[in-house]
Image: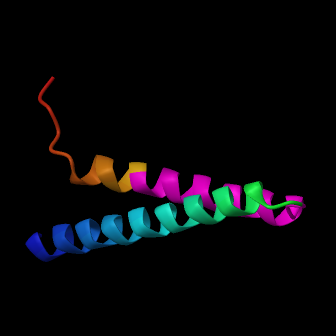
């Protein structure tokens, strides 16, 4: 079980780094003189998917509160 938690925690860190990288890419592309709208939409969609995956893993790692 302990190794399983570590793999989730590691994956969470990797996803957060990837999300931050995508965030920077989206910001940079959006500020360009003539942004590639299709690429911008794809990057934003990928960033949203990463955010959803991050939220899912955070729920797995958080201890469940008793009702």
**Residue located at (41% from left, 55% from top):** 54
Q: Is residue 32 magenta?
A: no
**Residue located at (57% from left, 62% from top):** 24
Which residue lies most toward the front here? 33
Q: Position of residue 6 (x, y in %)?
A: 18, 72
Q: Is residue 39 magenta?
A: yes
Where's the C terminus, which quadrant? Answer: top left
Which residue lies most toward the top here? 67
User: What range of the chain is rendered magenta?
Assistant: 34-54
Q: Is residue 9 left or right of residue 12?
A: left
Of 29 and 55, which appears nearest the observer?
Answer: 29
Of 52 and 22, which appears nearest the observer?
Answer: 22
Of 31 and 50, which appears nearest the observer?
Answer: 31
Q: Is residue 6 left or right of residue 17?
A: left
Q: Position of residue 41 (x, y in %)?
A: 79, 57
Name the image quarter holding residue 66: top left
């Amino acid at each position: 079980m302990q190794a399983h938690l570590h793999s989730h925690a590691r994956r969470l860190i990797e996803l957060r780094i990837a999300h931050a990288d995508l965030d920077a890419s989206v910001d940079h592309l959006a500020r360009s003189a003539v942004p590639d709208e299709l690429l911008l939409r794809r990057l934003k969609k990928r960033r949203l998917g990463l955010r959803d995956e991050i939220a899912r893993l955070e729920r797995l790692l958080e201890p469940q509160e008793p009702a």
